[in-house]
C-alpha cells in the first residue's frame, strides 16, 4: 500500500508514526470496551448479590411466617367451634380453608397432576361406597373425607432453605405450647386448673370443644390434672405434638435448650401416645447420623434424670403399659380392639362390603361406643371404603408424599400417629401432615425438568394475582 508523504519527510518515519497511532487507537478502544464490560459486570454482580442477600434474609423470614400462618390454626384453634345449622364447625378448619383459598387465588399454590388424578380416583371410590350404601351412609362424613384429604393435593415451589424455615416455624409454635404446658402444671397448686383450661369463662362453652374429648384429664391415681398446653383438645394431643417436635429437633436442628423445654412439656402431659412415637422412632432418628444420636441421648438422659429425682411420676407411665390387656382403655382401643373387630368383620361381611365398604360414617354403628372415639383410623378406613377404597387411598397418599422434603423418620411417625393413635378425619393433624410433608415438594433433577418441559407443564396453577 502506498502512503503519500509530504515533501522533505522520510517515508519510513511516516509509516512508523501511522502504525503507532493505530496501535494507540486500538489500545484505547480495547480499554474502553474492557472498562464498560467491567462496569457492567460489577453492576450485575452487585445486583445479584443484593438479590441473593434479600432472598436469604427477607423471603426466608416471609416463608417462615407463611408456614406459621398455615400451622397456627391447627395448633391454637382446634378447641374452638362455630355453630353451623345443627352442628358445630371446627374453627381451625375454617381458618385453614381460608388460608388455602387465599394462597391458591394469589398464585402461590399449585396442584400436581398425579396427585389430582389419584384424588379423583379416590373420590370415585368414596362415591361408589356412598351410593351403594346410601340409606345408612353419612353425607357429612363423605364430604369431610374428600375436603380434608384435598388439603394434601396442593404444593408450592420451595428450596431446602425455605422448607427448613417452615420447620423452624413449626418448632417455634411447639416451643410456645410446651412453655404453656410447663407453666400450666404448677398453677393448679395455686388456682383451679379447670378454670385455667376453660379460659376462666372468657369464651362461651358452646365455642369450646367438649363431648368425647378428655380436655380436663386427671392423672391416674391423683387429683392433679395433666397439661394440655391450654389450646390443645387433650393432653394426648400435646404429647403427640411435642414428640413430633423432639424428632424434628433431633434430626434437623439439635438445639439442647429447645430439646430440654419441649421434653419437659412432653412429660407433663403424662400421656402414652407420644411416648409410643418416641419409643419407635427416636432410635431410628439416632441411627441416622452421629449428631442426631447425641441429641437423642441428651433427651433420654434428661428424661431419666427427671424421673429419678421424682419431679415426674414414673408410675403413671408404667401404668399405661398395662392398658393393652385392659378393656375400656385407650391403649386397648387403639391396638387390640381393632384386630378382633376386623376379624369379626371379615367373617360376617358380604363380598360387596369387603370390596367397596359399608359407606362413609357407617363405622360408628359397627364399633362399640366406648372405643369409637379412639379406635385406629385404619379400621374405619377399611370398614367404610373396603379393600378397593383403602388401596386407592394408600396410592393417593403415596403420590402426595413422593419427593417430599420432610425427613423419612418424621413422615413415618406422622403416618403411625394418624393411622393408630388418632381418630379418623382429624382436621388439625391432617393440616400438619399437609404443611410438613406434602406442601413442599423437592424438584426433580434438571434433566427430567428439561425432558418434561417438551411435553407441557405438569402443574395446575392457581390464579396469577399478586
Image (cartoon, grey):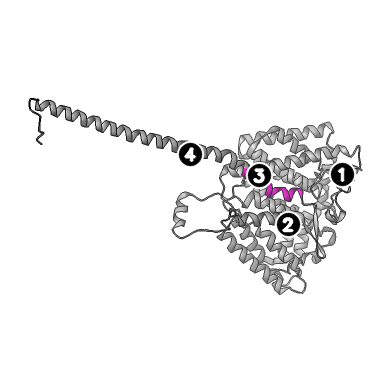
At 80% from the left and 33% from the top, the residue drawn is 306
The answer to whether the residues at label 3 and label 4 have Cβ atoms under 8 Å apart is no
User: What residue did someone put label 3 on?
Assistant: 65
Residue 371 picture location, percent across and down: 82, 58
Looking at the image, which residue is at 10% across and 29% down? 6
Q: Mark 2 highlights which residue?
A: 94
Q: Which residue is mark 4?
A: 48
Between 1 and 91, the residue placed more toward the observer is 1
* Residue 8 rendering spot, x and y as whole percentages: 7, 25
In this view, the mark in front (3 or 1): 3
Q: Is residue 422 left or right of residue 48?
A: right
Q: Which comes before the other along the chain, label 3 or label 4?
A: 4
What separation in Å lies between label 1 and label 2 (alpha carbons)? Answer: 25 Å
Q: If you read the primary sequence from the N terminus, does the residue marked by circle 2 or circle 4 appear first?
A: 4
Region in magenta: 62-77
Q: Is residue 457 above or below residue 125?
A: above
Task: Check if mark 2's residue and mark 4's residue have beta carbons within 8 Å.
Answer: no
Q: Is residue 364 left or right of residue 45?
A: right
Task: State the CA–CA distance, disc 2 to disc 4.
Answer: 41 Å
Amino acid at each position: 500500500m502506498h502512503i503519500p508523504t509530504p515533501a522533505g519527510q522520510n517515508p519510513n518515519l511516516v509509516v512508523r508514526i501511522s502504525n503507532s497511532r493505530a496501535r494507540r487507537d486500538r489500545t484505547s478502544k480495547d480499554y474502553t470496551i474492557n472498562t464498560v464490560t467491567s462496569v457492567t459486570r460489577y453492576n450485575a454482580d452487585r445486583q445479584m448479590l443484593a438479590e441473593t442477600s434479600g432472598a436469604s434474609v427477607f423471603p426466608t423470614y416471609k416463608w417462615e411466617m407463611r408456614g406459621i400462618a398455615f400451622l397456627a390454626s391447627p395448633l391454637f384453634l382446634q378447641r374452638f367451634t362455630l355453630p353451623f345449622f345443627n352442628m358445630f364447625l371446627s374453627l381451625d378448619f375454617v381458618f385453614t380453608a381460608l388460608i388455602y383459598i387465599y394462597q391458591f387465588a394469589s398464585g402461590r399454590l399449585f396442584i400436581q397432576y398425579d396427585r389430582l388424578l389419584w384424588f379423583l380416583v379416590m373420590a370415585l371410590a368414596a362415591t361408589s361406597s356412598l351410593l351403594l350404601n346410601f340409606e345408612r351412609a353419612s353425607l357429612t362424613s363423605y364430604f369431610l373425607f374428600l375436603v380434608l384429604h384435598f388439603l394434601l393435593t396442593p404444593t408450592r415451589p420451595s428450596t431446602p432453605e425455605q422448607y427448613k424455615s417452615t420447620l423452624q416455624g413449626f418448632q417455634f409454635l411447639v416451643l410456645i405450647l410446651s412453655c404453656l404446658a410447663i407453666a400450666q402444671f404448677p398453677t393448679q397448686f395455686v388456682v383451679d386448673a379447670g378454670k385455667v383450661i376453660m379460659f376462666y369463662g372468657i369464651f362461651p362453652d358452646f365455642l369450646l370443644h367438649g363431648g368425647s374429648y378428655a380436655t380436663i384429664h386427671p392423672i391416674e391415681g391423683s387429683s392433679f390434672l395433666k397439661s394440655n398446653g391450654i389450646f390443645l383438645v387433650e393432653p394426648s394431643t400435646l404429647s403427640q405434638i411435642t414428640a413430633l417436635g423432639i424428632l424434628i429437633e433431633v434430626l434437623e436442628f439439635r438445639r439442647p435448650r429447645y430439646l430440654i423445654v419441649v421434653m419437659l412439656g412432653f412429660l407433663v402431659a403424662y400421656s402414652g401416645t407420644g411416648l409410643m412415637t418416641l419409643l419407635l422412632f427416636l432410635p431410628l432418628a439416632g441411627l441416622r447420623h452421629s449428631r442426631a444420636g447425641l441429641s437423642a441421648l441428651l433427651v433420654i438422659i434428661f428424661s431419666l434424670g427427671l424421673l429419678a429425682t421424682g419431679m415426674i411420676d414414673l408410675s403413671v407411665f408404667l401404668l399405661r403399659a398395662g392398658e393393652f390387656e385392659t378393656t375400656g382403655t385407650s391403649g386397648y382401643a387403639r391396638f387390640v380392639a381393632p384386630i378382633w373387630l376386623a376379624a369379626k368383620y371379615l367373617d360376617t361381611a358380604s363380598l360387596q362390603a369387603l370390596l367397596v365398604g359399608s359407606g362413609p360414617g357407617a363405622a360408628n354403628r359397627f364399633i362399640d361406643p366406648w372405643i369409637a372415639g379412639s379406635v385406629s383410623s385404619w379400621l374405619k378406613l377399611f370398614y367404610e371404603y373396603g379393600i378397593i377404597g383403602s388401596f386407592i387411598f394408600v396410592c393417593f397418599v403415596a403420590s402426595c408424599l413422593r419427593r417430599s422434603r420432610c425427613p423419612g423418620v418424621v413422615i413415618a411417625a406422622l403416618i403411625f400417629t394418624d393411622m393408630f393413635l388418632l381418630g379418623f378425619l382429624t382436621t388439625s393433624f391432617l393440616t400438619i401432615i399437609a404443611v410438613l410433608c406434602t406442601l413442599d415438594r423437592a424438584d426433580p433433577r434438571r434433566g427430567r425438568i428439561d425432558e418434561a418441559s417438551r411435553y407441557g407443564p405438569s402443574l395446575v396453577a392457581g390464579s396469577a394475582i399478586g
